[in-house]
């Protein structure tokens, strides 16, 4: 399967980046084709709600930014993994931008499965992000393959690494 991991943390060596890398390693070891993109390092603007995509654009966004690199990757992915730090109760802005920009095509063409990896300093801050993720799965008609959270004392541990390996085994 083609797996696309969108990693949304601006911290290159942070816990979310570590989780995304561990997911990539486990998926590659299982024989999947994996592309990991650090969307925090991309210049992706929010949707303008201009409706160009649904009128003159025939499904293409008028904005010419780094999202142009992601559209083909998202449209070829069978599995989409979102890796997001939780700063304030919901998916970070760096993950939100590419999700919102899928408005122009409605949903990724081949994505049938999704997973969510989240890290935060605090426990109990994942409900908003989890609800949004599940709504996206439902709207895109994608199977929820699992959610892994890691608060500060769980980050970069063997226990979280094993959860990621187990999640990938169920994809």
Image (cartoon, rainbow, N blue to C red):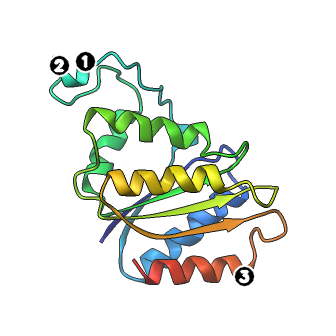
Kindly check if marks 2 and 1 are in contact, taking CB atoms under 8 A apart as contact.
yes
Q: Nearer the viewer, mark 2 or mark 3?
A: 2
Quickly name the residue at label 2: 55
Classify 142 as above or below 84.
below
The relative height of residue 48 versus residue 134 in the rendered view (above or below) is: above
Residue depicted at x 15% and y 27%:
58
Residue 41 seen: yes
Whether residue 6 appears in this view of the structure is no
Quick check: 85 left or right of 43? Answer: right
Residue at left 27%, top 45%?
72
Point out residue 143 in the picture as x, y percentages from the top left corner.
36, 67
- Residue drawn at 47 percent across, 57 percent down: 134
- Check disc 3 and report its element: helix, strand or loop: helix
What residue is shown with label 1? Answer: 52
Q: Nearer the viewer, residue 27 or 143?
A: 143
Taking 132 as reference, is 157 above or below it?
Answer: below
The residue tagged 3 is 158
Question: In 3D space, how far apart are the residues under numbered discs 2 and 1 (Cα atoms)?
Answer: 5 Å
Q: Is residue 142 left or right of residue 60?
A: right
Residue that sits furthest to the right in the current view = 153
**First in residue order: circle 2 vs circle 3:** 2
The residue that appears at 57% across and 65% down in the rendered structure is: 21
Quarter of the view holding residue 18: bottom right
User: Mark 1–mark 3 contact, CB under 8 Å?
Assistant: no
Q: How many marks?
A: 3
């Amino acid at each position: 399967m083609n797996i696309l991991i969108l990693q949304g943390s601006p911290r290159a060596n942070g816990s979310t980046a570590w989780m995304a890398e561990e997911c990539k390693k486990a998926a590659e070891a299982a024989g999947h084709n994996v592309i990991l993109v650090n969307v925090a390092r991309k210049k992706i603007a929010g949707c303008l709600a201009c409706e160009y995509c649904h009128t003159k654009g025939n499904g293409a966004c008028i904005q010419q930014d780094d999202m142009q690199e992601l559209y083909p990757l998202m449209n070829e992915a069978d599995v989409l993994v979102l890796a997001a730090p939780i700063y304030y109760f919901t998916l970070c802005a760096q993950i939100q931008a590419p999700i919102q920009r899928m408005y122009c095509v409605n949903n990724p063409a081949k994505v049938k499965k999704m997973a969510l990896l989240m890290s935060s300093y605090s426990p109990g801050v994942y409900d908003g992000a989890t609800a949004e993720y599940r709504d996206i799965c439902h709207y895109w008609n994608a199977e929820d393959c699992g959610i892994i959270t890691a608060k500060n004392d769980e980050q970069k541990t063997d226990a979280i690494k094993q959860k990621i390996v187990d999640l990938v085994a169920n994809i």
